Structures are given as structure tokens and as C-alpha cells.
Amino acid sequence: MKSLDELLSKGIEGRRVLVRADLNVPLSDGAIADDGRIRAVLPTLRALLDAGARVIVMSHLGRPKGAPDPAYTLAPVAQRLGELLGRDVTFASDTVGTQARDAVDASVLVLLENLRFNAGETSKDDAERGAFADQLAAFADFYVDDAFGAVHRKHASVYDVAARLPHYAGYLVAREVEVLKRLTEQPDRPYIVVLGGSKVSDKLAVIEALLAKADKLLIGGGMCFTFFKAQGKAVGGSLLQEEMVDTCRDLLARAGDRIVLPTDIVAADRFAADAQTSIVDEVPEGWLGLDIGPETVKQFGAVLGTAKTVFWNGPMGVFELKPFASGTRGVAEAITQTDGFTVVGGGDSAAAVRALGLDDSAFGHISTGGGASLEYLEGKALPGLIALEA
């Protein structure tokens, strides 16, 4: 991949640069609930603007159905981006129409409306996707991809535009790839992986891939109950993927003591912040397992204390509800106290770090792309990276 510094070295004053960012931020009543993804692209945007470039930023937000939907407008993002950069951001109320063309002609810094308001962005049809990419590419002289959270998608703005313009990796994408290469090629050992989240099926491929690389896999979150069922333990009404029980049984047989499961669970009589709770080793009928227990936090912490490399993806429980946040907090704090290189694998894990008020700088790296980072670790070819390497 060609670097952003290579582009800057060309002298780009007055030239137009199309930047794919990942501004897919969570919204609450129309307000931005977490601006972490906006902040992540600021170094690339500042470098381009400082070099005198005219910058056109594009992104998706949510999952609109290929047509404009006011619930997914990027207008609040444009406002926040301007506040963080300390400069005016012109918001174009369409992606490639008259508003966008006028804004690009008249402004130094433009944010286009949600790319997914155009069906061509996510189309499986190469011609439809390509036609949209042609319109986007016509805005600029160069293309910079700084949307790591989208590089696993074969979308027009990620894959096809790069084939139409001289293309470069932004600072964020370059850093993400550097970190993931470190995890996959020669991680310092012991290499400890912490996996949480709800479904085994979502993490099966990465578990398979990491079994060959990691020294220990610590498994919490809702996915641990399918492993419990494979061991013959009672799981009550906890989240369970019955169709994955045999798969988990096979994984446990092959992994031996390299897979470490919780020894105690915070169970509740219902899914609510004011539910009755109990610490159990098996979940009784009618109860739900909603977090790992205090002994498991100590157990996981002891393993993490030996680590030289840590990768964490997925919360240990329902951290959004205070009674079930201790497991995620305890594991996160244990990760920050290791002497090794620590990586938070995006998604809900990154959200948990911020929601729990933990210091981002205490981790070696917090990824902006949960799905992309997992697919990279699985060994999949990511379309956005393939395009940048072409």
C-alpha cells in the first residue's frame, strides 16, 4: 500500500482528495453518543488540509435501504467534525447530485451525505456499483482510504473508487494493518486472546484461526454458555446456540487447556438492572447468565498477567447494565496492567472501554473495526486492502 506521506510528498496544494472515512457513529435521539470514529480520522484530514488540499469526505452511517432516510443523515457528524477540526465543514445533502457537485466546487472541506442512500454503494452488481464509483471518483484527483471499519466490504466507495484514482492508505488504515500484522505474524509470547460477545457462530472462524496461534483463549460473554452446554453444565435461560454445541465440544477436545472458560457466573432472575442476582457455577432453570463472576475475573486476570501480547474482542457480559458490568471492567483493567502489547478489537469492546470510563491510552491499540479486524485475523482477503495494494 502507498502511504499518505507519499501523497503529501507530491505537493497537493489545491488538489482534490476524496477520503473514505468510517463515521458510522452511534446516535441517540439524533445526537452522537460516541465520537470515537470521528476522532480517529482527524490526523489524516488535518495532514491533507495542512498540505493545502481540498478534501471531500465520504462515509456511511447505519443500514439505510439504498435511499435517503432522515434517521441516518450525516448532518450531525458534519457539525461534530467541524467542531473537532476547528474549521468549517460544508455538508452536501446528497452524495453525487447537484448539492454535492456545488459543494465540492465551492468548498475546501466537504462531507457528502450518507453513501448508503445510493443503492450503488452496496450493490452486488459490478456495473451498478461501478457507475456510482465513477460519479464519486469524478470529484477528485486522489483517493485516500482511512475507513478501516469498512475494508472488509466490497462496496463502491471502498473497492471500486480505488481502481479509478491514484490511491493511498490513510494513517488509521496503515496503523490498523501494522497492528494486525504484528498479531498474525510474530506475536510476542505468551499470546493471550480474550473473546466475548453473544454468539459462538460469529466468532467460530476466528477461534479456529487463533487456536493455531494463541497460547490461551479466554472465553466469556454470552458465547460461553454454548461451551458450558457442551460440557454438560446447566445454563438455564441463558443465551444458547443449540446447533453449535457439538462444534464447541469438538473445539474443547482439540484445544485442551488452551481454552479457558469461566468458573463462576453472575446470574439474574430476569434481564433488568434491578433484577435479583446470584453468583453461581451453573445457571439454574429460569435464570439467565449475564456476566462472568468475580472468581473468573481473578482467574482471567492471572492469565493476562503473564501475557506479552493480548487481543480482546467482545464484552464479558451485559456491560450496559451496571450489575453486569464488573466482568468486562475487571478484564479490561487486567489488560491495561499487563506489560505486553494490548489490542482492543473494535466493536462492542471499544464501546465498552469508553462507556466504562476507561482510559483509551492505557491500551496499546483500540481498533475502529471489529468485523474487519476479526476477518483479518481469520486470514480472509479484505476487498478494501486488496484495492489499496493494487
Image (tube, rainbow, N blue to C red):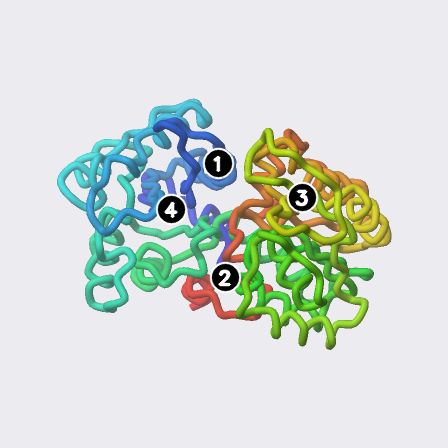
Q: Amino acid at mark 4?
A: Val
* Residue at the (71%, 61%) spot, across then down: 233
Q: Which mark is residue 1?
A: 2
Q: Give SS at disc 1.
A: helix
Quarter that holds the C terminus: bottom left
- Nearest to N terminus: mark 1 or mark 3: 1
Q: Give SS at disc 3.
A: strand
Q: Which residue is mark 4?
A: 19
- Nearest to N terminus: mark 2 or mark 1: 2
- Nearest to N terminus: mark 3 or mark 2: 2
Relative to residue 163, is residue 100 depicted above or below? above
Instruction: Residue 380: give x, y in percent of width and height.
Output: 52, 70
> Could you tell whether 213 is left or right of 4 in the image?
right
> Looking at the image, do the residues carrying marks 4 and 1 touch, with CB atoms under 8 Å apart?
no
Q: Residues within 10 Å of mark 1 (few under 14, many from 20)?
A: some
Instruction: Residue 146: give x, y in percent of width and height.
Output: 45, 48
Q: CA distance from mark 4 to mark 2?
A: 15 Å
Q: Amino acid at mark 2?
A: Met
Residue closest to the eye, 39 or 318: 318
Q: CA distance from mark 4 to mark 1?
A: 11 Å
Q: Give SS at disc 2.
A: loop
Q: Which residue is mark 1?
A: 42
> Could you tell whether 378 is left or right of 387 in the image?
right
Q: CA distance from mark 3 to mark 4?
A: 46 Å
> Looking at the image, do the residues carrying marks 3 and 4 touch, with CB atoms under 8 Å apart?
no
Q: Give SS at disc 4.
A: strand
Q: Which residue is mark 3?
A: 267
* Residue at the (43%, 54%) spot, across then down: 150
Relative to residue 134, is residue 94 depicted above or below? above
Q: CA distance from mark 2 to mark 1?
A: 20 Å
- Nearest to N terminus: mark 4 or mark 2: 2
Q: Residues within 10 Å of mark 3 (few under 14, many from 20)?
A: many
